[in-house]
Image (cartoon, rainbow, N blue to C red):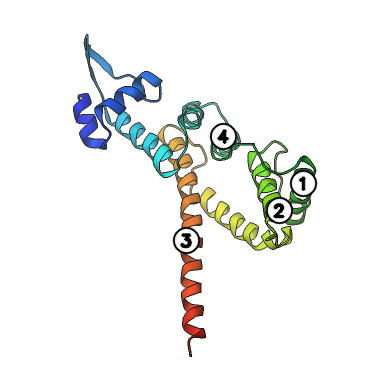
Amino acid sequence: MRISQLSSQTGVTVATIKFYLRDGLLPAGQRTARNQAEYNEGHCRRLIVIRTLTEVMQLDLASTRRLLHAIDDHDLPLSELYQEIGLALYSDRSTFAHAEQLTEAYAEVNSFFEHVGWTIDAGAPGRHRLAQVIAAMRRLGCEPGVKFFTPYADVAERLAEQELDLLPDEIVGAERGAAVMRSMLLDVVLVTLRRLAHEHRVTMRSKTATP
């Protein structure tokens, strides 16, 4: 298909497609003339992945590029591929907490992982994000104690098992991208459903409290 057809099928403007091509996010098409190229369904799929990462997941282009590179690296083990998801989602390691507060939060995170029996890499970006959350909650005076997270961890582990059961024994080709996108989009589902559940329960409590 021509670039105009690619644009029509994906809803991505021609100008944006050309930007992705220049930036290396989208592979070049098959050259047919000096200023013309043909594209295929693989390009359509890639554009949908890029737009999902940048619009639904709200990743910046640098994180999107890094994640796409990991998906394309078929020699990268699944464990490292999932680590790349964490790096894409939690790339910002800045914090407004004092060093001492963050050190204390890290100690609590380590203790919590021991409590729930999780084996987590010391450099996992999610470990830092959880420490940031604990430090922020403490500074805001709304810290419930790290053991309060145990039911969240139980649910998260069950969901992770359910998700991983969907994967074939060997992930190859487009399945790698599908696995990554499903994992990231299910993050959005989990957060959205939790927020909607809050909305539902608050409404039900209000009805119960009404004379």
Separation (CA) of disc 1 from disc 2: 9 Å
Which amino acid is tagged 4? Answer: Glu
Q: Say whether disc 3 or disc 1 marks the residue closer to the N-terminus.
A: 1
Nearest the camera: 7 or 173?
A: 7
Q: Residue at x 73, y 51 (%)?
A: 113
Circles 1, 2 touching at the beta carbon (< 8 Å): yes
Q: Is residue 123 above or below residue 142?
A: above
The numbered mark at residue 101 is 1
Q: Quadrant of residue 28?
A: top left
Q: Position of residue 183 (x, y in %)?
A: 49, 45
Instruction: Please tell me which residue is depicted at 27% across the width and 26% down the height of the picture.
Output: 15
Find disc 3 in the rendering and name its residue: 193
Asked if the residues shown at circle 2 and circle 4 are in contact, with their CB atoms under 8 angstroms apart, the answer is no
Classify mark 4: residues with Cα within 10 Å, few (<14), some (14-19) or many (20+).
many
First in sequence: mark 4 vs mark 3: 4
Q: Secondary structure at mark 1?
A: helix
Separation of disc 1 and disc 4 at Cα? 27 Å
Q: Is residue 29 left or right of residue 119?
A: left
74 is higher (above) or lower (below) than 106:
above
The amino acid type, in three-letter code, at marker 3 is Leu
| Mark 1 or mark 4, earlier in chain | 4
Kindly identify which numbered label has been placed on residue 139.
Answer: 2
Q: Earlier in the sequence, mark 2 or mark 4?
A: 4
SS assignment at label 4: helix
Residue at the spot of label 4 = 84
Is residue 191 rendered to the left or right of residue 92?
Answer: left
Is 131 in front, or is 114? 131
In this view, which residue lies farthest toward the top?
A: 34
